[in-house]
Amino acid sequence: MKNRQKKLGVIGGLGTDTAAQFYVATERLWHASGATSHIPLMLENTQSPFALEQSLTQAVSRVDELRDFLSCAAQNLEVGGATLVVLPCNTAHVHIDAVRSAISVPMLSITEEVAKKVKREQAHVVGILGTRVTKTAGIYDIACQKQNLIAIYPHEQDQLIIEGIIQRTLSWKNNTEDTSLLMGVIDRVKKAGADTVVLACTDLQLSMPPRPVDRVFDSMKILAEASVNELMTQ
């Protein structure tokens, strides 16, 4: 690794707006660190069909179809010179073990980085807002357990609201009404016992209000921070 120029490889396409926001976030963090040039970054969009991406917000039946697309994108990034790979999509992390085994360079986990971040912020019970695949696969349950945190989820009606917001965002149809709906779910999850809420779908941050919301953490921003910190140590 010491003999290679450091470079961040981003698997994109699973939410185009999110991939673009992730690029901007890492660029800003890189400059804020005192760097005198642009962040060394490359982006590889997965070639997964739009219909597959939409289906993953509500069903687990097709999730296995995504594995090869992710592995191929990661391999292309490594061939292109990436020394660190990241995937700014929570749902796709059901395949992180397979993608990690497909490449020889390090790959950060968004669920692991989020759990470590909220633990540092004194979280105890974490409300997870994400797709049905994220919830059913239990990827946050595993990450939270490692940090001695409890993960809870919205009730079914609110889960459907979250899935609708994500689907509209993927189709570039989200609006201010979705911001109101999302804030309602956040309030109800907090009332159900969560002292901290995680936007465990990187598309949800696009429906948040511009003002910061207390004890609500954006998984995309956390991954961006972890990515820049890790890249700087290479």
Image: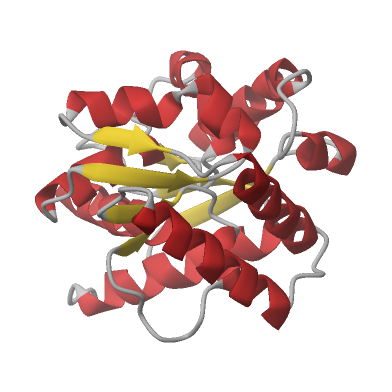
Question: Foreground residue, 102 or 1?
Answer: 102
Q: Residue 74 occupies which quadrant of the picture? A: top right
**The C terminus is located in which quarter?**
top left
Whether 75 is drawn above or below 158: the answer is: above
| Apparent side of residue 29 relative to residue 133 in the rendered image (left or right) | left
Image quadrant where one finds the N terminus = top left
Q: Is residue 83 left or right of residue 86?
A: left
What colouring method underlies this structural image? Answer: secondary structure
Looking at the image, which residue sits at the far front? 191
- Give the residue displayed 71% in from the left and 40% down from the top: 57
In x, y percent, where is residue 123? 17, 49
Hey, which quadrant is residue 35 in on the image? Answer: bottom left
Q: Is residue 198 left or right of residue 233?
A: right
Write down the quadrant of residue 68 in the picture: top right
Q: How many numbered badges does the structure rendering display?
A: 0
Residue at the image point whose x is 46% and y is 58% from the top: 188
Q: From where the camera sits, is residue 214 visible?
A: yes
Residue pictured at 57% horizontal, 65% vertical: 182
Residue 42, position as x, y percentages in the image: 53, 53
Please tell me which residue lies in front, 42 or 197: 197
x and y, in percent, of residue 19 in the image: 59, 58
Query: In this orientation, does residue 108 appear?
Result: no
Residue 58, position as x, y percentages in the image: 74, 35
In the image, taking residue 44 as reference, residue 214 lies left or right, namely left
**Does residue 8 lie above or below 33 as drawn?**
above
